Amino acid sequence: MNLSAHFTLAEMVVSQTASRKGIDNTPGPNEIAALKQLCEKVLEAVRVHFDRPVIVTSGFRSVTLNKKIGGSSTSQHCQGEAADFTIPGVSNYELCKWMERNLDYDQLIYEYGESGWVHVSYQVPFRNMELTKRRGTRYIPGIVR
């Protein structure tokens, strides 16, 4: 099932942990609708602007999967509203800065620098909240190196 021109439901729900542990990671209709919005309103714009594949490392997570990996109990991944991703050959920092200037979103998090990933969530109304997460620290306001 296509969620947008460049994103499928299959890639937004894939999980090695779920496969290994036999955890059902199937979203319901509300979560699929939220994933569609995330793909159409945010991830598509990123894909088109950078003209490179967007590698989603974590999209939808069932509540069971989220607990198993130690995710936050309020994770927007469980509602289909969030994705973690990278773009090969593009700096995570530069990606975040472009998104900050050009897109609306709920949260944008620069997680663990260049060896990490970008987390984005989409929910209306937009908070357009930017954060940085480094190992061993709390979240830092803004996108900072």
Image (cartoon, rainbow, N blue to C red):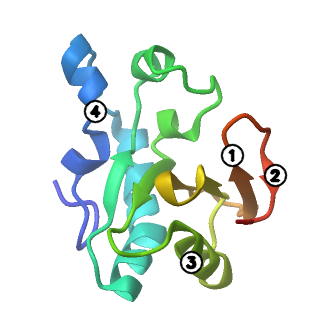
User: Label 3 to label 1, Cα distance in Å?
Assistant: 17 Å
- Residue 17 is situated, as x and y percent measured from the top left of the image, at 30, 23
Q: Quadrant of residue 106?
A: bottom right
Q: Which mark is residue 134?
A: 1
Q: Which mark is residue 15?
A: 4
Q: Is residue 132 above or below residue 66?
A: below
- Residue 36 is situated, as x and y percent measured from the top left of the image, at 37, 58
The answer to whether marks 2 and 3 mark residues whose Cβ atoms lie closer than 8 Å is: no
Q: Earlier in the sequence, mark 2 or mark 1?
A: 1
Q: Which mark is residue 123?
A: none
Q: Secondary structure at mark 3?
A: helix
- Residue 82 is situated, as x and y percent measured from the top left of the image, at 50, 48
The front one of 29 and 102 is: 102
User: Label 4 to label 2, Cα distance in Å?
Assistant: 28 Å
Q: Secondary structure at mark 1?
A: loop
User: Label 1 to label 4, Cα distance in Å?
Assistant: 24 Å
Q: Earlier in the sequence, mark 1 or mark 4?
A: 4
Q: Earlier in the sequence, mark 2 or mark 3?
A: 3
| Residue where numbered disc 2 is placed | 140
- Residue 45 is situated, as x and y percent measured from the top left of the image, at 43, 79
The answer to whether marks 4 and 2 mark residues whose Cβ atoms lie closer than 8 Å is: no
Residue displayed at 33% across by 34% down:
27
Instruction: Please tell me how crowded label 1 is: few (under 14), some (14-19), or many (20+) other residues with Cα within 10 Å.
Output: some
The answer to whether marks 3 and 1 mark residues whose Cβ atoms lie closer than 8 Å is: no
User: Label 4 to label 3, Cα distance in Å?
Assistant: 27 Å
User: Label 2 to label 1, Cα distance in Å?
Assistant: 8 Å
Q: Secondary structure at mark 4?
A: loop
The answer to whether marks 2 and 1 mark residues whose Cβ atoms lie closer than 8 Å is: yes
Residue displayed at 56% across by 77% down:
94
User: Label 2 to label 3, Cα distance in Å?
Assistant: 17 Å
| Residue where numbered disc 3 is placed | 94
Q: Secondary structure at mark 2?
A: strand
